[in-house]
């Protein structure tokens, strides 16, 4: 289905959905924290934001922060203080991608303090990323999950500049809500399409001269420089999933996508890339998922969306009767952004912050092999040092967790036996990698 037709359909559906109130509302309205923050009622705001009623009990806070009053755009977050030393430990943001994916997916199925089982039960995650850092999971941008706007299509993000601006407004208020964390080291992390979001937010922080103490960026299996991450044919051929004739056909399609990108036809390029991936992986190779070729049928995952819409969960998270958005409209409005490169911004950021780009070895969509062409061509102050650097085995204890290469403030890493969702497939190794990065421990 073409981008134009899909967008037209989703606009009709969105208009129809807005005519009906959300069902099973736990209360009339969501907890909007901005009025309390602006009035200096910080203690009251934090008391209201405290999450209660979930088992097991884990200290956390949730609510919405207004990032655009004209549009009535509000961003939802769920924040977990560090279980070690919250007053001193680093603070991180985790973002899932899509575009249009809720970061509650990451919280409940990857690296958050809560783990959601297939049968809908919560438990404590053994390798949660808040062991030694405070971490917030944020539905980004507006129009995803419980983040919403009442301003209609003009108020949705159509490019990464808008994404970055809204998010920095969110962060500025978040640190007013938790002022004791303002001077802690701060990190932006995420995966997949967060390869766009994370650099956009960091670049906005850099250019706005914000007081946020940003120290680094960590991106897993990120879509960052799409035109130079089009290397699916060779990867699949070397794995034996396709023959030489299919390889040649896919290489031709990859070249056509590059031509479309260079011509500025980003939506068409995105459509072609989407169709190429679906057809190549689904028909010649026989896979039902592109995220991990060790699991051809796909990994069974809990229904986190249904869980988040339970009345008791809505009440605990203070979202009231607002609509849970699956991000379809957000995705379609950002579709022309899909094939545009974040490389220039990333190269600038690499001269100012520490950067970790990590990849699951078995990811067939945004994997290590497909990304090396753009990584090896990055232009930054440490480029020459990186080109001369030696690749190292990355150990976690006595286990070979992967392979890394570092130069200056930059590290690229491949995690063994993991797919697109590294913290899910290799939780122990992912936590070790994350902790080493935020505490600046050499790999």
Image (cartoon, helix red, strand yellow):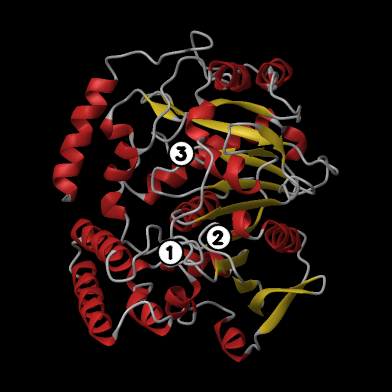
Instruction: Calculate the distance from the C-alpha at mark 1 to the C-alpha at mark 3.
Output: 20 Å
Position of residue 3 measured from the top left corner of the image (x, y, whole percent) = 19, 49
Q: Earlier in the sequence, mark 2 or mark 3?
A: 3
Where residue 282 sits in the image (x, y, percent)? 31, 63
Which residue is denoted by mark 3 in the rendering?
Answer: 166
Q: Are marks 1 and 2 in contact (CB under 8 Å)?
A: yes
Q: Which quadrant of the structure image shows residue 218?
A: bottom right
Q: Is residue 6 left or right of residue 84?
A: left
Which numbered marker is on residue 224? Answer: 1
Q: Position of residue 265 (x, y in %)?
A: 18, 62
Nearer-the-camera pick, 216 or 8? 8
Query: Which residue: 28% across, 27% down?
Result: 152
Residue marked by disc 2: 219
Instruction: From the top left corner, tell me how far across and down residue 346 is, in percent.
Output: 49, 65
Residue 189 lies left or right of residue 435; in this view the side is left
In this rendering, the answer to whether 245 lies above or below 441 is below
Alpha-carbon neighbours of circle 2 within 10 Å: few (<14), some, or many (≥20)?
many
């Amino acid at each position: 289905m073409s981008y134009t037709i899909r967008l037209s359909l989703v606009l009709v559906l969105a208009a129809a959905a807005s005519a009906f109130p959300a069902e099973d509302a736990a209360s009339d309205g969501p907890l909007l924290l901005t009025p309390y923050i602006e009035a200096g009622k910080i203690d009251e705001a934090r008391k209201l934001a405290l999450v209660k009623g979930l088992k097991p009990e884990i200290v956390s806070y949730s609510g919405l922060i207004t990032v655009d009053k004209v549009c009535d755009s509000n961003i939802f977050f769920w924040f977990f203080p560090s279980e070690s030393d919250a007053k001193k430990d680093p603070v991180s943001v985790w973002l899932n991608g899509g575009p249009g994916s809720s970061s509650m997916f990451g919280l409940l199925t990857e690296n958050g303090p809560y783990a959601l089982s297939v049968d809908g039960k919560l438990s404590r995650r053994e390798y949660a990323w808040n062991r030694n850092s405070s971490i917030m999971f944020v539905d980004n941008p507006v129009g995803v999950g419980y983040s919403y706007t009442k301003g209609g299509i003009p108020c949705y993000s159509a490019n990464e500049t808008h994404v970055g601006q809204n998010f920095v407004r969110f962060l500025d208020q978040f640190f007013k809500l938790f002022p004791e964390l303002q001077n802690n080291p701060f990190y932006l992390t995420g995966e997949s399409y967060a390869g766009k979001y994370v650099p956009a937010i960091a670049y906005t922080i850099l250019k706005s001269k914000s007081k946020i103490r940003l120290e680094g960026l960590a991106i897993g299996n990120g879509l960052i420089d799409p035109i130079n991450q089009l290397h699916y044919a060779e990867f699949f051929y070397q794995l034996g999933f396709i023959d030489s004739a299919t390889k040649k056909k896919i290489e031709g399609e990859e070249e056509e996508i590059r031509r479309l990108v260079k011509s500025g036809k980003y939506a068409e390029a995105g459509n072609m890339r989407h169709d190429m991936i679906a057809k190549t992986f689904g028909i010649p190779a026989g896979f039902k998922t592109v995220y991990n070729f060790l699991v051809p049928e796909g990994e069974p995952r809990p229904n986190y969306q249904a869980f988040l819409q339970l009345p008791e969960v809505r009440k605990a998270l203070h979202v009231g009767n607002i609509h849970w958005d699956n991000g379809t409209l957000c995705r379609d409005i950002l579709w022309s952004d899909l094939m545009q490169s974040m490389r220039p911004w990333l190269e600038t950021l690499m001269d100012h912050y520490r950067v970790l780009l990590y990849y699951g070895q078995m990811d067939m969509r945004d994997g290590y092999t497909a990304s090396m062409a753009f990584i090896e061509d990055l232009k930054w102050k440490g480029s020459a040092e990186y080109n001369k650097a030696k690749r190292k085995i990355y150990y976690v204890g006595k286990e070979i967790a992967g392979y890394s290469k570092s130069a200056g403030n930059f590290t690229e890493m491949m995690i063994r036996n993991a797919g697109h969702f590294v913290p899910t497939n290799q939780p122990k190794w992912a936590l070790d990698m994350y902790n080493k990065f935020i505490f600046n421990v050499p790999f």
